[in-house]
Image (spheres, rainbow, N blue to C red):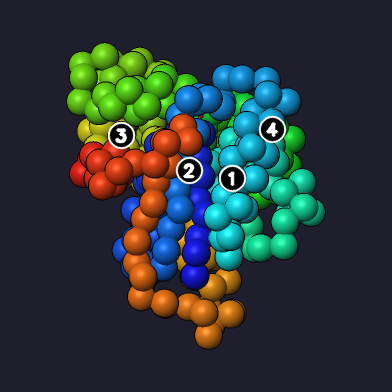
Amino acid sequence: MKIGIFDSGIGGITVLNEALKMLPNEEYIYYADSYNAPYGNKPKDVVREYIFQVVKFLDRQQIDALVIACNTATSIAVRELRKIYDFPIIGMEPAVKRAIEYNNDKRILVTATNLTLKEEKYHKLVERFDKQSRVDSLALPKLVEFAENYMFDEEKIISYLTSQLEIYEWKDYSSIVLGCTHFPFYKKWFREILPDHVKIIDGNKGTIKHLKNILSEGKENCNNNRGKVTLYYSGEEDKDNYILNKYLRIL
Ligand code: DGL
């Protein structure tokens, strides 16, 4: 099957990485809209326009399914896209449900982009699962910027994350949700800064499990053994998967 996958930039590579482990034989077309990244700090209408351009591009590649490897883009456009396109569309949302299922007594911190946290979709999600008002939300836009600039170990990343996270009483929290696909690149720093009992949860595996279920419904086309990735970086093909491999190495 040919699977289109996109993000505002390279964050969705953290999702593609799971796809390559769980569904290694599919063909992937990844679009990183890095020229327009970040989405999370821009007006909704502008971001919506970017998303529609990207999906139009992927549709022209005749994809069989689409993964929106971006929480922000999902919250802005998934409903509308599903009305327009016939192929299955898998979106992403912060893993609030999983975090509450993991522990329903303590607090949960959901991290994402400003836009995701502002959107109605997120508020409805929290309303639905957070019956005891235990969810707090925090935007971490700089992590998107750092990842797009291929910065992963610099001191300023650690001090940024520390300053954002040190204000919480972590003994009251059971988990932190990484609700932006750029954030798993920084898992090791989250782990180092947070106490051991705080579980780090992201929705990447769940998204690919969902994709796997959808693909196995059309069994005859599944596993065509082509197993390759073509990445487009702001519209330009990533020759020899140079950018892709550079980012996969971080994970
Ligand atoms: N990676 C994206 C997400 O999951 C968006 C980051 C951005 O462009 O602000 O929300």
Say whether marks 1 and 3 touch (CB < 8 Å).
no
The residue where tag 4 is placed is 48
Q: Position of residue 120 (x, y in %)?
A: 74, 35
- Does residue 127 appear in this view? no
3D distance between C-alphas at marks 1 and 3: 30 Å
Dot 3 alpha-carbon crowd within 10 angstroms: few under 14, some 14 to 19, many 20 or more = many
Mark 1 vs 4, N-terminal side: 4
Q: Which residue is mark 3?
A: 186
* Kind of residue at badge 4: Arg
Instruction: Name the mark nearer the viewer: 2 or 1.
Output: 1
Q: Are marks 2 and 3 in contact (CB under 8 Å)?
A: no
Q: Is residue 27 above or below residue 236?
A: below
Disc 1 to disc 4, C-alpha distance? 14 Å
Given the image, on which type of amino acid does mark 1 rest?
Phe
Q: Quadrant of residue 41?
A: top right
Q: Nearer the viewer, residue 19 or 124?
A: 19
Q: Nearer the viewer, residue 52 or 208?
A: 52
Q: CA distance from mark 2 to mark 3?
A: 21 Å
Q: For mark 1, does the 10 Å Cα neighbourhood hold few (<14), some (14 to 19), or many (20 or more) residues? A: some
Q: Residues at badges 4 and 3 in contact (C-beta under 8 Å)? A: no
Label 2's element?
strand
Give the spatial CA distance, label 4 vs label 3.
27 Å
- Residue drawn at x 53%, y 85% is 220
Dot 2 or dot 4: first in sequence order is: 2
Whole-number angstrom distance, CA of label 2 to CA of label 1: 9 Å
245 with respect to 112 (left or right): left
